[in-house]
Image (cartoon, helix red, strand yellow):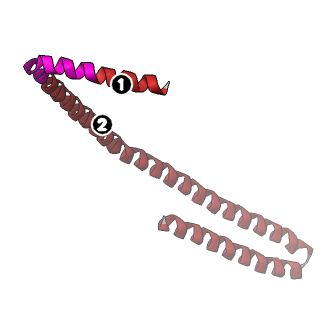
């Protein structure tokens, strides 16, 4: 970015120097009279064209730099995307394994104590049913 700023500053300084020189030439030309006026106009025209050319070059370089930064940003975002996807997959896998383990533990408990499990489920159903019935 400093390189771009330096080039811009140099282009502006160059334009200012060119304008200063053109002004000096304009004063000399005015003293020489009518013939000098045409030479002055040509000189100012060349200075303006030179300045415009310098500004166009700086603008082109700035455009190239922005495109380069955009490309670099997109390239940097790729690995971040992959890391987020991997993190989500790992979280899903861990949650899935935990749910499977819990399901196996509950199934083993129900098989080991079938009658108390039925009674507990029946009582829980009554409590939930009464709670919902009393609210409505």
Residue in the picture at 58% in, 67% down: 8
Which residue in the structure is indicated by mark 1?
128
Residue in the picture at 29% in, 42% down: 83
User: Please, what secondary structure does the residue beneath circle 2 have?
Assistant: helix
Q: Is residue 72 left or right of residue 29?
A: left
Residue in the picture at 31% in, 36% down: 85
Where does the image place residue 11, in percent across and percent down from the top left? Answer: 61, 68
Q: Is residue 43 left or right of residue 117?
A: right
Magenta stretch: helix, strand or loop mostly:
helix
Q: In this view, does 98 lie to the left or right of 108?
A: right
Where does the image place residue 60, in percent across and percent down from the top left? Answer: 57, 54
Residue in the picture at 85% in, 68% down: 38
Up-down relation of residue 93 to residue 66 (above or below)? above
Where does the image place residue 55, in percent across and percent down from the top left? Answer: 64, 61
Which residue in the structure is indicated by mark 2?
88
Task: Pick whichever, 130 or 53, lies toward us.
Answer: 130
Toward which corner of the image does residue 87 lie, by quadrant?
A: top left
Task: Pick whichever, 7 or 97, lies toward us.
Answer: 97
Check if residue 87 falls in the magenta segment.
no
Q: What stretch is highlighted in magenta?
A: 107-123
| Furthest-right residue in this view | 34
User: Please, what secondary structure does the residue beneath circle 1 have?
Assistant: helix
Mark closer to the chain start, 1 or 2: 2
Toward which corner of the image does residue 88 lie, by quadrant?
A: top left
């Amino acid at each position: 970015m400093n390189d771009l700023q330096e080039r811009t500053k140099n282009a502006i300084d160059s334009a200012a120097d060119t304008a200063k020189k053109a002004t000096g030439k304009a004063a000399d030309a005015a003293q020489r009279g009518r013939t000098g006026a045409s030479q002055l106009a040509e000189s100012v025209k060349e200075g303006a064209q030179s300045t415009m050319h310098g500004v166009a070059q700086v603008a082109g370089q700035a455009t190239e730099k922005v495109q380069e930064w955009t490309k670099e940003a997109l390239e940097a975002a790729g690995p971040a995307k992959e890391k987020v996807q991997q993190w989500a997959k790992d979280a899903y896998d861990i949650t899935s394994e935990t749910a499977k383990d819990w399901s196996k533990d509950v199934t083993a408990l129900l098989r080991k104590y079938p009658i108390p499990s039925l009674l507990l489920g029946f009582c829980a159903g009554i409590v939930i049913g009464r709670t919902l019935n009393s609210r409505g």
